[in-house]
Amino acid sequence: MMAISEFALAAIENNLSAIPIKAGTKKPAISKWQPFQKRTMNPGEIRKHFVNGCQVALVAGSVSGNLECLDFDNPELFQPYLDTLEGVDNDLHRKLTVWQHTPSGGYHILIRCTEQPQGNLKLAMSKPYKDDQGNRRQDVFIETRGQGGYFLVAPSNGYRLHGKLSEIPVVTTDEVDLLHSIARSFTEDVQQQSQTPHRTNSTTSDRPGDRFNQENDWHHLLESEGWRYIKTVGDREHWQRPGKNGAEISATLHPERGLFVFSTSTPLPDRKPLDKFGFYAYSRFNGDLSSAAKSLNIHDSEISEYSEKSEQTRTFRIDKNSSDGCQTVFSNYSDKSAKPRELSKDVLFFIESEPAPFTNNDLYSELCARTREEKKSIANALAYYAKTGKINKIDGKRGHWEVVEAEPEVMDLLSVSAEPFNIPLPLNISEYAKVHPGSVILVSGSSNAGKTVFLLSIILNFLRLHTYPHTPQYLSNERIDIAPKEDIPAMTYLNSEMSAGELANRIKSFGADPSTWVRHVKFIERSHSFDKLVLPDGLTFVDFLEVNEDFFMAGKFIADIHRRLKSGVAVVAMQKKQGQRYAKGGEMTIEKPRLAINLDRNEPHGFICKIIKCKEPVDFMHSIQDMERDFVISGSSEILPISDWRFVNEQQRRQINAEYTKNGIPNLVKKACLDYRTGQPIGSNKAAA
């Protein structure tokens, strides 16, 4: 890791002002740091002040080239924030390449503005609450460090920087406004930021706007004006304005905080939360609240008349076909001519896949039930499944349910085999790690780091063992002594990214005939619901598990695959960012796998394989968890090792790569197929010694 003083020198080379921070605090280590809000230290000052184990901070603002830091104190908002930004402005999303982890689990995004940034801003806040002493408090979710502020940065303890200081992106004033407004959309304190024309917490108000808010459905309102639902991220829905195409989003919808519009091409006020009545008033009356309220002023007698009809609802519906755009009528969702959706099977599927307690509203949302008939169909189905014993009502909570668990299956510890699943993994991993039946192996790799070759090599190794059952084989250039089964296991390869032609060419690159492979392996094109095609007692390959939106669901998808396994094994490939420890989905992705393997590029010196989880090593005294091994991929798609298993830190990695540059070991192995230890051809007796 770069020394603190070296980092400070690098900072001033990139027009960034750095100051020392007392170890274990966030306070400057010098009494007068304010001058460095206007100028950067010179090298002599850095050598003088960056001593005694201090940490380092960057000063934001004009002194650092209009540097600003977006500080996410609530880490759960970081990914939804990026997902929202990607939908609103994908080009801006792609710019944000320099960011860091903080010791508390939060995140910093570093940007440079075309104009001097504002001072420190609190963008998203929690709802007010009272602490143990009765004092009113609010938590800061997202804030900035702008003009005059500073923030700690790696290599300070606990901080990890992604990207380079020389590559901090420059964004325009409009782009800064957009970044800030998306952050503000996550605030829970709606009253603080709201300029909504009509909002009340009363549930008994007779004002037309209040009744409109209580009675109406957001989906119907938005769709009646031509808005299109795109997707749901966390607890927020993404919507697209009328006239737009593709996946770009124009607004987000939160069940409590309302509609937050980012587009300036609608009659709605942008970057402010709106309730339902506000949306109606701006959409139909250009924000004229009085006219909007008058259009909803239905007398109590009329309401009573309709409420007495049990088959009708009191929900307001905007009549899109009205000539003046102002007429409001009652919806009659009990139109006998309309055939309601049959939802009982969907309800059963939800019950069987969601063992946690749930509510009626959870089902309405999951099944997109909007009409009265649809909700009634769900309620009837729930009543039936309660009667048949699949679910129970939770006492004292209307519309709350719990799933009745089946009689638990007692584990048979006496008759079950304790033998591991004989799976010949590349790079001799099987010599160090046991894989028992019912296990998931996770192979996470950055782009073009060899995930597909790794998975196909396992199949090739099985085929070789089956072909020569009594002869130890050199599989991926490693001697293995795994005794093969009499019959090769049933294998399924679920492919989500390659065409049939591309996959066939991959197989041919091994020097193999695809017709031999297809006799033993069922290749299926699949990009979703992988768990439904898992072989419970065979070997299933998933290449790869795509999680492009709701990354927090990745752990659940892997758990679903694990749940389907009996005596079989699943090998699941996932994408990850170069150099990161976890795949998309974070730490939850390695909760179920018993063995987790990372593949990274080590350009231009081949690749690195690292074991980040080995739940059961062959020898607990010689576990390879957190060890790594370098390898190359030959022209015939063989995975060829160029090092032993070892622990490697950053300094050692630089030394190793320097030796590769000097001696040309990776190219020597890749082109000549020589054993890296003996210099003899791979497969020869001398190479095997």
Image (tube, rainbow, N blue to C red):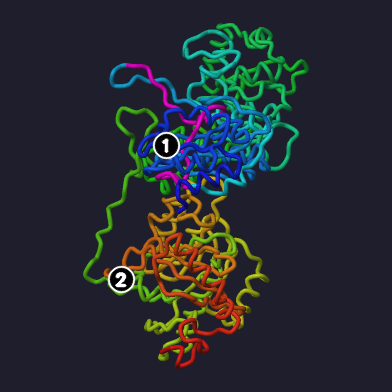
Q: Does the CB distance between marks 1 and 2 fall below 8 Å? A: no
- Label annotation for residue 426: none
Q: Residue at x 42, y 91 (%)?
A: 471
Q: Which range is magenta?
A: 135-160
Which image quarter is the N terminus in? bottom left
Q: Secondary structure at mark 1?
A: strand
Q: Nearer the viewer, mark 1 or mark 2?
A: 1
Q: Is residue 6 above or below residue 194?
A: below
Q: Residues within 10 Å of mark 1 (few under 14, many from 20)?
A: many
Kindly give the residue lying farthest to the right in the view shown.
323
Residue 90 image offset from top left, x and y in percent: 66, 42
What amino acid type is highlighted by mark number 1? Ile
Q: Give x and y (percent) for residue 605.
A: 56, 69
Instruction: State the residue lying farthest toward the front.
Output: 44
Q: Disc 2 designates what residue?
A: 622
Q: Residues within 10 Å of mark 2 (few under 14, many from 20)?
A: few
Amino acid type, callout 2: His
Instruction: Left or right? Give the position of 387 relative to 168.
Output: left
328 shown above or below 263: above
Residue tagged 1: 21
